[in-house]
Image: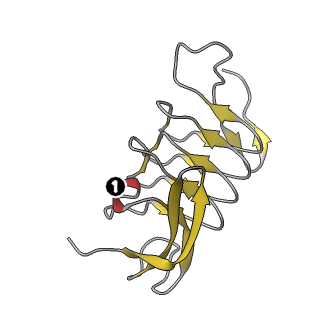
Amino acid sequence: MTKKYELLVGDCLRAGDRTVYRIRALRDFGDVRRGDLGGYIESEDNLCHKGYAWVYDAAQVYGPDAVVRDNGRVRGCAWVMGRVEDDAVVDDLAIVAEGATVSGREILLYDEIARPLGQARALQARVTHCGFPAHPA
């Protein structure tokens, strides 16, 4: 399998006691073009080289269980310490807490927080269509 990005060791940030590195695309895939700069990840364990998964803008993905895979997308200033998979999108100032998963076609926006199931005050990601909340089922 061909790598789709590289870590830029000269462009890094501190996230608490962790260091996250900006990524740069090595090939075209989805809406990403070779040479595009992405967001920040702690290690290659945090972003799968398969599928169209990508971390954009100033978003950060870090921690031992954090991963973006399949076609998951993390944008804006979002923080991911859990999992983003399938066709899920995490954007704006949203946070995916350690142990939480955003999956399927879920979209987590604004300042929403995805917490592991079973935690008090767990929030369900609101699926949106064209920026408007979907109608309840």
Q: Considering depth in this image, is 70 or 134 the residue closer to the camera?
A: 70
Q: Quadrant of residue 133?
A: top right
Q: Residue at x 56, y 35 (%)?
A: 97
Whether residue 115 is situated above or below residue 72 in the rendered picture: above
> Which residue in the rendered view is the most extreme toward the front?
17
Please, what is the three-letter code of the amino acid marked with disc 1? Asp
Q: Secondary structure at mark 1?
A: helix
Render colour scheme: secondary structure
**How far across and down, in percent of the image, does residue 28 sit?**
42, 81
72 sits to left or right of 26: right
Q: Quadrant of the C terminus?
A: top right
Q: Is residue 2 left or right of residue 24?
A: left
Quarter of the figure with residue 124:
top right
User: Label 1 neighbourhood size at 10 Å, few (<14), some (14-19), many (20+)?
Assistant: some
- Assign the N terminus to one quadrant of the image: bottom left
Which residue is at the far left?
1
Q: Residue at x 50, y 34 (%)?
A: 98
Q: Is residue 69 left or right of residue 106?
A: left
Asked if residue 125 shows in the view, the reply is: yes
Q: Position of residue 43 (x, y in %)?
A: 39, 60
The residue shown at (35%, 62%) is 44
Residue bearing the label numbered 1: 45
List x then y, in percent, for residue 88.
53, 46
Look at the image and tell me whether residue 90 can be seen.
Answer: no
Q: Is residue 33 above or below residue 119?
A: below
